[in-house]
C-alpha cells in the first residue's frame, strides 16, 4: 500500500494548472455509449475513477483507445454483454449512469449495487423511480438490479430533491427516447451543462440546461463528436483553500473562475486577497483569516465537495465558524482527524460542526476516508508543523491527478512512499 509522507510548515509558491473535471469526464465518457460512432475526448484527467470506468466499459465490449495523455477515443459499436461487471462496476458510483445508454440501445441492463465514497445514505431509489417513469421494468435483488424495456416513452419527471447525477442520467436516456421529456427541479451544475452541450453536438435536442427545468426532444439516433472536458472547479477551490491555509502565494491556471464564485467570495470575506482573471485565480497570503459560516448547497451555492478543504482552512481563522453540510450526512465525520492534529472542532450533529480558531495544527498519522476529505487531510498536513503520514491515498488518487508531483513543483514537501 502507498502513503504520503508530508513535512508541513512551508509556504508554497508558483503556478498550478487545473486538470479536466472528474465530475464531467466520467459522465461524458458514459454518454459516448449513446451512439455506435466514435467519440473523441481531450483533457480527460488521468485518475483512478477514470481507470475504473474504462475497465467497466471494456468489460461491456466498448473500445477505449488512448491517443495521448488525456486524449481518448471511445466507440461502443456493439456490446458484448449488458450485465455490468461485478468486479469493477460496484467500485464506482457513476455505474448507475450506464443504465440509460444500455436501455435505449439494448433494451436491458443488470447493475450490481454501486459503490463510490462512503458519504452516508446514497440510495439509488431516485434512479429506480426515474427509469420507471420512462417505462422501464425493474427487478431488484439483494445484490443487483435488472432493468428492461421493450419500448421506452418520454415523460415529465419532477425530482423530489436536486440530484446532479440523477439529472444527467435522465437527460441521457431522454435524448434517445422519442417525444418530449421535461425534467423539473433539475441540477444546474456546469458539468450538467457540458453534458447537454455534448449531446447537442451529437444531434440531441435539449434546451433549458443550466436552469431548474430541462426540456428534451428525443431523437432516434445520435452521432459521434469530439469534446474537451471543462476545467475542474473543485480543484480550483481546493488549491485556493490550500494556498490560504499555508499562507502561500499561488496562481491557479487553466480554470474558469465563474464556475465557483460563491467559494471565492467566501475566501474574500475571510480576508484572503484574490486576483481573478478570465482563466486564473491568484491567491495571496492573508494578514489574518476571519471566521465565517458556510452552508453547502446545490449549484450555484457552496459545493459540498469543497466543504472538507474549507473546514480545514477555517481551523486557521480567528473566531468561531459554523459549517452546515446539507447534502450528505456523515461528511463531517472526518473532523475528528483534525481534532487529533490540534483543531478545536465540535460536532453538533451529523450535519453541523462548530470550529474554534485559530489553532495550530501538528503532524499526525492519518487515513483518507474519501476523495475530498483525503485531499483536505493533505491541506491540513501541509499547514501543520511536523511530519504527517496519510494512508489509503488510493481514495485521493481517485479524484486528483498526480497530486504529489504537482504540489512538489510548488515547493511542498510531500512524497509518495510504496510499501
Image (cartoon, helix red, strand yellow):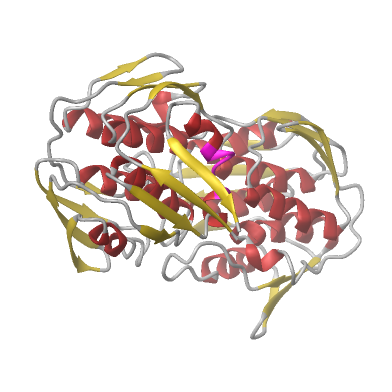
Task: Identify the main secondary structure in magenta.
Answer: loop
Answer above or below: position of 21 versus 257: below
* Left or right, residue 10 beside residue 372: left
Along the horizontal axis of the image, is 28 left or right of 161? right
Closer-to-camera residue (215/415): 415
| Residue 355 is a magenta residue | no
258 and 305: which is toward the camera: 305
The residue lying at 39 percent from left, 13 percent from top is 277
Residue 342 occupies quadrant: bottom left
Which segment is the magenta one? 397-404
Closest to the observer: 312 or 105? 312
Q: Is residue 419 visible?
A: yes
Seen as rendered, the residue at the extreme left is: 319
Can residue 208 be seen here? The reply is no
Q: Which residue is drawn at the image coordinates 12% and 47% (left, top)?
A: 357
- Quadrant position of the N terminus in the picture: bottom right
Q: Is residue 348 above or below residue 319?
A: below
Q: Quadrant of the C terminus?
A: bottom right
Q: In the visual, does 322 lie left or right of 193?
A: left
Image x and y of residue 103, in percent: 77, 61
Magenta span contains residue 403: yes
In the rendered image, the vertical position of residue 16 relative to residue 140, given as above or below:
above
Query: Relative to 351, does residue 66 appear above or below in the rendering?
Result: above
Q: Nearer the viewer, residue 291 or 147?
A: 291
Could you tell me which residue is drawn at 37 percent across and 62 percent down? 328
Amino acid at each position: 500500500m502507498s502513503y504520503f509522507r508530508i513535512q508541513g510548515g512551508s509556504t508554497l509558491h508558483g503556478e498550478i494548472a487545473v486538470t479536466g473535471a472528474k465530475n464531467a469526464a466520467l459522465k461524458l465518457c458514459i454518454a459516448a455509449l449513446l451512439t455506435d460512432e466514435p467519440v473523441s475526448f481531450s483533457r480527460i484527467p488521468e485518475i483512478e475513477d477514470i481507470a475504473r470506468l474504462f475497465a467497466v466499459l471494456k468489460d461491456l465490449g466498448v473500445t477505449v483507445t488512448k491517443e495521448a495523455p488525456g486524449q481518448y477515443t471511445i466507440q461502443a459499436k456493439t456490446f458484448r454483454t449488458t450485465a455490468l461487471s461485478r468486479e469493477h462496476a460496484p467500485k464506482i458510483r457513476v455505474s448507475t449512469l450506464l443504465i440509460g445508454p444500455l436501455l435505449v440501445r439494448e433494451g436491458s441492463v443488470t447493475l450490481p449495487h454501486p459503490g463510490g465514497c462512503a458519504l452516508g445514505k446514497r440510495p439509488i431509489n431516485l434512479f429506480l423511480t426515474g427509469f420507471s417513469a420512462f417505462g422501464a421494468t425493474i427487478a431488484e435483488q439483494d445484490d443487483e438490479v435488472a432493468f428492461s424495456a421493450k419500448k421506452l416513452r418520454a415523460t415529465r419527471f419532477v425530482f423530489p430533491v436536486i440530484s446532479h447525477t440523477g439529472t444527467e442520467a435522465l437527460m441521457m436516456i431522454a435524448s434517445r427516447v422519442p417525444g418530449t421529456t421535461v425534467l423539473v427541479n433539475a441540477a444546474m451544475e456546469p458539468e450538467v451543462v457540458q453534458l447537454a452541450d455534448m449531446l447537442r453536438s451529437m444531434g440531441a435536442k435539449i434546451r433549458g440546461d443550466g436552469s431548474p427545468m430541462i426540456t428534451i426532444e428525443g431523437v432516434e439516433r445520435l452521432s459521434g463528436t469530439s469534446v474537451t472536458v471543462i476545467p475542474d472547479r473543485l480543484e480550483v477551490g481546493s488549491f485556493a483553500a490550500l494556498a490560504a491555509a499555508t499562507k502561500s502565494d499561488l496562481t491557479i491556471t487553466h480554470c474558469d473562475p465563474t464556475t465557483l464564485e460563491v467559494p471565492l467570495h467566501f475566501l474574500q470575506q475571510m480576508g484572503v486577497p484574490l486576483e481573478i482573471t478570465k482563466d486564473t485565480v491568484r491567491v495571496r497570503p492573508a494578514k489574518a483569516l476571519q471566521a465565517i459560516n458556510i452552508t453547502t448547497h446545490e449549484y450555484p451555492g457552496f459545493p459540498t465537495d469543497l466543504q472538507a478543504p474549507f473546514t480545514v482552512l477555517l481551523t486557521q481563522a480567528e473566531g468561531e465558524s459554523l459549517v452546515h453540510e446539507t447534502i450528505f450526512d456523515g461528511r463531517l465525520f472526518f473532523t475528528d482527524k483534525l481534532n487529533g492534529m490540534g483543531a478545536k472542532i465540535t460536532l453538533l450533529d451529523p450535519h453541523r460542526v462548530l470550529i474554534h480558531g485559530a489553532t495550530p495544527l501538528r503532524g499526525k498519522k492519518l487515513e483518507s476516508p474519501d476523495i475530498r476529505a483525503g485531499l483536505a487531510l493533505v491541506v491540513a498536513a501541509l499547514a501543520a508543523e511536523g511530519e504527517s503520514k496519510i494512508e489509503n491515498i488510493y481514495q485521493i488518487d481517485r479524484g486528483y491527478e498526480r497530486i504529489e508531483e504537482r504540489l512538489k513543483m510548488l515547493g511542498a514537501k510531500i512524497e509518495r512512499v510504496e510499501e
